[in-house]
Image (tube, rainbow, N blue to C red):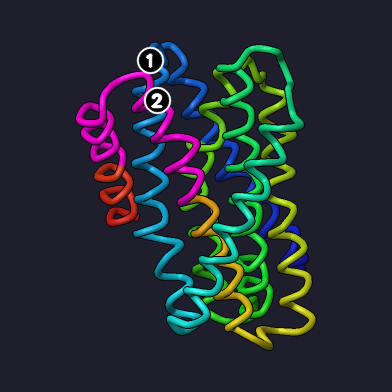
Amino acid sequence: MTSVWLIGFLATALGIGFGGGVAWSLKGFQKSIATIYAFCGGLIVGLIYFEIGPESIQLGDWVIVSLGFLAGVLLFELLHKTFHRNLVMTGNREKDLLLHTALLLTIGIGLHNLPVGVILGATNDTSIGMSILPALILHNIPEGIIMFTPLFLVGLGFFGLVIVSVLVALPVAVGASIGSVFGIENPLLLAFFISLTIGTMLMITIREIFAESIKLSSFSYCFFISLIGYALIGIYFQVI
């Protein structure tokens, strides 16, 4: 029987990579950084509200969710200060901002994938485990779109897409290995990690994405575009 960690890894990489392919196909429409940022901000908020948030609440209680969220906010502040002070990658402010945002999103999605992998490994021989696999593919497509959009804007190619997809899928493989051996010993710990992801990604949306889009355009325009992204991801999760 194929190892659950390998199945989870491949399913996640496929979903992330497919989302990256969608982002790549939209390159010709990426004329306005403000529009792209606002739209991605709406996608992220929708992803949190319709998928990641319910996962956390289902596994834990409001105290754990709140503590995890606070830890995610603090983690973002630490990473934000470190990247913006020490990481000058291209010498171009706009490109550096896109790279910083993409790096933070990659870390946030990777953190979320670790507890998802644990759940997959622990439920491998159940009907829940079987239902998680197609969900991994479908639910990682919007994450791939969100993550790869800023990367493609700074010139990432197909080889880079493959490498990043593999890196983001690795936490699922690690988590699935842990879950298959130890099971879900402490669902509250998983809830904490997922809530940490929520705090980190929400701060990325507010501080890195939405704030920058407002600087380049107007609040009303960016809010409207964000609503479109939020509505589309809501429809997507309703359909799947």
Note whether residue 1 is visible: yes
Verify CB contact (< 8 Å) between mark 1 and mark 2: yes
Q: Amino acid at mark 2?
A: Ile
* Boundaries of the magenta span: 202-229
Circle 1 packing at 10 Å, graded few (<14), some (14-19), many (20+), is few
Q: Amino acid at mark 1?
A: Ser
Q: Position of residue 146 (x, y in %)?
A: 49, 37
Give the residue at the far bottom of this rendering. Answer: 185
SS state under label 2: helix
Circle 2 packing at 10 Å, graded few (<14), some (14-19), many (20+), is many
Q: Residue at x 59, y 65 (%)?
A: 71
Image quarter (top left, top right, bottom left or bottom right) of the N terminus: bottom right
The number of numbered badges drawn on the structure is 2
| The one of 16 and 152 positioned closer to us in this rendering | 152
In the image, 71: left or right of 173? Answer: left
Could you say which quadrant of the image residue 206 lies in?
top left
Q: Position of residue 20 (x, y in %)?
A: 55, 32
Q: Residue at x 51, y 28 (%)?
A: 149
Q: What is the C-alpha distance between the residues marked 1 and 2?
A: 6 Å
SS state under label 1: loop
Residue 17 in the image: above or below residue 72:
above
- Magenta region, mostly helix, strand or loop? helix
Residue at which label 2 appears: 36
The label on residue 32 is: 1
In the image, 63: left or right of 45? Answer: right
Residue 128 in the image: above or below residue 24:
below
In the image, 34: left or right of 65? Answer: left
Note whether residue 138 is visible: no
Q: Residue at x 64, y 56 (%)?
A: 75
